[in-house]
Image (cartoon, grey):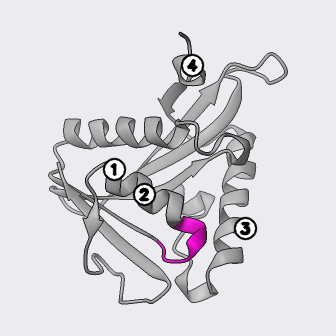
């Protein structure tokens, strides 16, 4: 039995497709709507293009969209040290949430992190109810709550999680 995810393509992206900027602007708008400004740690397009960031996009074939199809998800990995990376910019298209797009992106990025030699991946996400589906996804993949890492400071609007690879 074929599923939606059978036709999903995940690729390392250079962020040149203008649809990515629009998708990430929606992400920033969601973050700003759910968290106070000082607690929004989502990256803008310029930050996502920095050399310490690897950014992936997920696409589904769509005859109404130019190649490679319809953008349905994103995720990034930020280099923190030779052993530690941060998961950033995880987003699934609103109409496809809960159907496995986020899971597919997360699995892909965790595999890439292993291939790149990282031993740990950490993340920061919101603590509000809006983020509960993300919390559940991360827990299913072995992430556990942790203290702030990198340049983060304790924040009641943030939840920090990590997992060993």
Q: Which of marks 1 and 3 is nearer the N terminus?
A: 3
Residue at the limit of the structure toward the right, as seen here: 64
Label 1 CA crowd tier, 10 Å (few <14, some 14–19, many 20+): few
Label 3 CA crowd tier, 10 Å (few <14, some 14–19, many 20+): few
> Does 135 sit left or right of 26 as displayed?
left
- Residue found 75% across the figure and 20% down from its top: 62
Label 4 CA crowd tier, 10 Å (few <14, some 14–19, many 20+): few
Q: Nearer the viewer, residue 56 or 103?
A: 103
Tell me how far mark 1 sits from mark 3, CA to CA.
Answer: 27 Å
Q: Which residue corresponds to mark 1?
A: 140
- Residue found 36% across the figure and 38% down from its top: 107
Q: Which of 100 and 105 is in front in this view?
A: 100
| Secondary-structure class at tag 2 | helix
> Does 155 sit left or right of 116 as displayed?
right
Q: Quadrant of residue 44?
A: bottom right
Q: Which of marks 3 and 2 is nearer the N terminus?
A: 3
Q: Which residue corresponds to mark 3?
A: 29
Q: Earlier in the sequence, mark 4 or mark 2?
A: 4
Q: Which residue corresponds to mark 2?
A: 136
**Callout 1 touching callout 2 (CB < 8 Å):** yes
| Magenta span | 126-131
| Secondary-structure class at tag 3 | helix
| Secondary-structure class at tag 1 | helix
Q: Which residue corresponds to mark 4?
A: 3
């Amino acid at each position: 039995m074929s599923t939606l995810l059978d036709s999903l393509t995940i690729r390392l992206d250079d962020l040149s497709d203008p649809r990515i900027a629009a998708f990430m602007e929606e992400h920033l708008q969601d973050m700003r709507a759910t968290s106070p400004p000082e607690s929004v740690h989502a990256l803008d397009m310029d930050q996502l293009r920095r050399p310490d960031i690897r950014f992936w996009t997920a696409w589904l074939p769509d005859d109404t969209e130019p190649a490679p199809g319809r953008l349905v998800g994103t995720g990034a990995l930020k280099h923190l040290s030779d052993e530690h990376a941060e998961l950033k910019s995880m987003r699934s298209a609103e109409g496809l949430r809960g159907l496995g797009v986020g899971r597919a992106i997360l699995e892909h990025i965790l595999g890439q992190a292993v291939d790149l030699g990282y031993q740990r991946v950490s993340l920061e996400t919101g603590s509000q109810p809006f983020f509960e589906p993300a919390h559940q996804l991360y827990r299913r993949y072995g992430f556990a709550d942790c203290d702030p890492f990198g340049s983060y400071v304790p924040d009641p609007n943030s939840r920090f999680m990590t997992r060993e690879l």
